[in-house]
Amino acid sequence: MTALGREKKARQQPRFIVRAEAVWAACRYAVLAALCALCYNNSLRGELVHDDVWAIVNNPDVRPGSSFRNIFSNDFWGKRMADNTSHKSYRPLCILTFKLNILLGGMTPLYFHIINVCLHCAVTCLLLYTGERFVFEDSRLAFVTALLFVVHPVHTEAVSGIVGRADVLACLLFLLTFLSYIRSVGVCVSEDSLPSTVSVWFLLLSLLLGTCAMLVKETGITVFGVCMLYDALVLCRKPLVNFSNPGTTPPNPLQSTSATLSFSFFNTKIDIIYSNLKTSPALSISPPALPIFTPQPLSQFSPVSPLELSSFTTGMRSSTCILDPITSTLTKECLPAIAPLIIVVIIMSVRLWLMGGSMPLFSEQDNPASFSPHLLTRILTYSYLLSFNAWLLLAPIMLCYDWQVGSIPMVESLGDMRLLATTLLAVVMVALCLHCVFSLQESRQVLVGMLFLVFPFIPASNLFFRVGFVVAERVLYMPSMGYCILVAHGLGRLCSVMGRWGTTVLSVSMLLLILLFSWKTVQQNHVWLSREALFRSGIQTLPHNAKVHYNYANFLKDIGRHQEAIHHYTTALRLFPRHASAMNNLGTLTRDPEEAERYYRKALDTNPQHNRALFNLGNLLKSQGKEKEAETRLKDSIHFSPHFADAYSSLASLYAEQKRFAEASEVYLKGIENCPDSSDLHNNYGVFLVDTGEGELAATHYQQAVRLKPAHHVAMVNLGRLLRSSNENTEAESWYKRALQVTRKVDNLTPLGALYYNTGRYEEALQVYKEAAALQPDSTDILLALAQVLAMSGRTKEAEKMTIDIIAREGSCIECYRLLSAIYSKRGNYTEALNALDRALQQSPGDLTVRAELHFSKGNQLREMNQLDQAFESYELAVELKPDQSQAWMNMGGIQHIKGDYAAARMYYKRALLLSPGSKLLKENLAKLDRLERRLTGEA
């Protein structure tokens, strides 16, 4: 090979190495993305479960028509931050992602899950990048960290549960903030200098991203503490402590007692700035002496001379020259440390202002230890919970969606064996801290791992304020980054001291651990596929947890399995006798009003402010006629929960039943004012307005209900009925069809079928009623309506058979006999028609109107059979029961007219005319009677 060829090959070799490294880096990221997709592929089929329902389905802030301003004034669940029932969880940016999800893909759970998995994949890749650039020198250890993180089973709640997006997205912003902060600060070039701000823009970006992390979830604010300590201990290259003799090897802290420790970073920060100021050229000029003013009485002051004024001004200019470099130095070298502190203070101040100066209110079942009157119990339990969370990271064998109410018994004495786990954790943490203290530069991985592990967990530790849970796996999402870094660091250290075979064994063990974690993650994802799977898994995992029994009972109640629900509510009360909500729900399931009342009152004895128990007791008392106490209970329910829309509806309904329409309207309007996003309240107010004759205003509220909840099919049907009553059949039909697009329920089908029937569109009515009959094959009303449509469409044999079948199942069906009579009459079988009416009358209907109509129909049949005297008797019975039947009076007049009793006929015609003054037929009959009488008079 020539010299030129060797030179060309030498130039190409580094480029080849760079390309190979880039390919391997891309492969690492591709492996992580593929592993993430494989582990969470089965979660994409999941429904919206547990907290997803409250944060998304029932949250008015995420609906397409809601105001964006509400997102930034309400909490995570759509309640006002200042409300005393709010959990004060302020996460507007996370809610904003839910809203965008709905705007782009509707309520389809698939798209929510895809976003969550993509965010988890992004966090994993960003963690790999962070580990490669700023934590590990060996990129393989960074890769192990990311592998362990992407498959860790404790992440299933955060990734597979949609509301866990808050933790995943906050973690993503956490890492971006950390990277931006590091990018904004330079590297320390010597021991006598500090890293300066390289890029103010990256510093501002880190502050913005950190603020966004906090607006996604509260734990995001901890990133500023991580950044400041990383700056102090890693970027500044200063150990936490210095020994008194510089230049000597630090002695063993466990053997030497003469070593004097001094916190170096904070002292060095000031010393370096002072040294820089002394050596600054701007400060080498000796400023002129300033005039010295001694305090004198006010009466001895004289006007300032021009010479004194000039001297003073010159001194001030010189002082400004002194301060300029100081300000510049402080800004350049202290800005990265000061800016996060300022942002934290501002954020916390705004947060307290939004909370209305009040903390969230939690119940004993949410966090039992925090309600213990004994300080020792609280301290020991909180300490043990730290070791319990650490164990979940180390060995995520038993996972559960809810760890409340009895899942973890409180630690009440120093003799509790669980304190051994607390002691072991304390020893490990102290050892790691000491390792960081005395060999900072050699243990950067340990320091970063500790920062990532400890800081994000501080808000959940009960250290500064009470939290609303005992253990929550989703809050371990961010701390698990630190755990993975520490595990990878430990693996690297072990591999460095072991031989080839030891390294191989450790590598295989880590591979098996990753595979085991992957399998556990896939299995755990099945738990989050549906409400039933989630709640059943809770009972299987923690059968002594009252909360999981309560949640499963709620699910069983919703699907109609009431006996099983009662069993689990009873179990929840056995495990936690003060569970007021379980008592209340048991009351709703019992059929005995006295027993239900006993449960409601017992719930109120436990929690006098339980708004649901107050509401249910009020409704029960209303049904029993105890209206005064019912009114009091419903008012109390509104008082303790001003945003409880159902209580307003029940109280207004009570007033409406008492004919107190003005008060009912006032309650509805107050409810709409306090609960502007309640679609049910608008719908109920619309029904009230229709009943009070204000149909136009009712239509407005029906439409508002649909705007607030586009799937509110009840309001759509009610609006259709209102339009139908105004003969606006086309618009009514469109609203009925719109309701059927939401759900094809019987209650939505029958109004459309009635519209088709009344407008003569019998074939379309037939199709609608057939579909309704398929949904409820045992419904007499639907089958009877279908038979009526068959009869009107000329298919009388089918109608007759169906009607006889209904009578065979329910012999007291009076309308069936009437329909059967109409079918026979249409065929001309008047005798059979008459028999059908007699059988209907034999049922002795209690409604006088129904009996009157039966007698009227019987009179018609007898008249067709030319049995006028018997027909007249039937008509007489009809008007005795219902005197306002003008048609019966007219028919009686007609019979007397035919029989020649003109005086009696005139009397009956005039009586009918009083009831129907616009009847042309009556007027014609009277005119005929007049002509006939004149003719008879003329003949006479």
Image: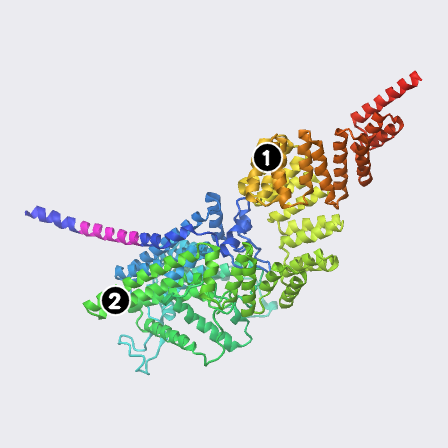
Q: Is residue 26 magenta?
A: yes
Q: Is residue 121 above or below residue 779?
A: below
Q: Position of residue 474 (x, y in %)?
A: 44, 61
Cα separation, mark 1 vs mark 2, equals 80 Å
- Judge whether residue 53 can be spotted in this image: yes
Label 2 sits on what residue type?
Answer: Leu
Label 1 SS = helix
Near mark 1 (Cα within 10 A), the count class, few <14, some 14-19 or many ≥20, is: few
Q: Which residues are magenta?
A: 14-31
Which residue is disc 1 drawn over? 798
Q: Is residue 379 magenta?
A: no
Mark identifier at residue 506: 2
Label 2 SS = helix
Residue sitting nearer the eye, 433 or 786: 786
Q: Quadrant of residue 564?
A: bottom right
Q: Closer to the camera: disc 1 or disc 2? A: 1
Residue sitting nearer the eye, 743 or 485: 743
Work out whether mark 1 precedes mark 2 in sequence or the reverse, and give the earlier one. Answer: 2
Q: Is residue 903 above or below residue 598?
A: above
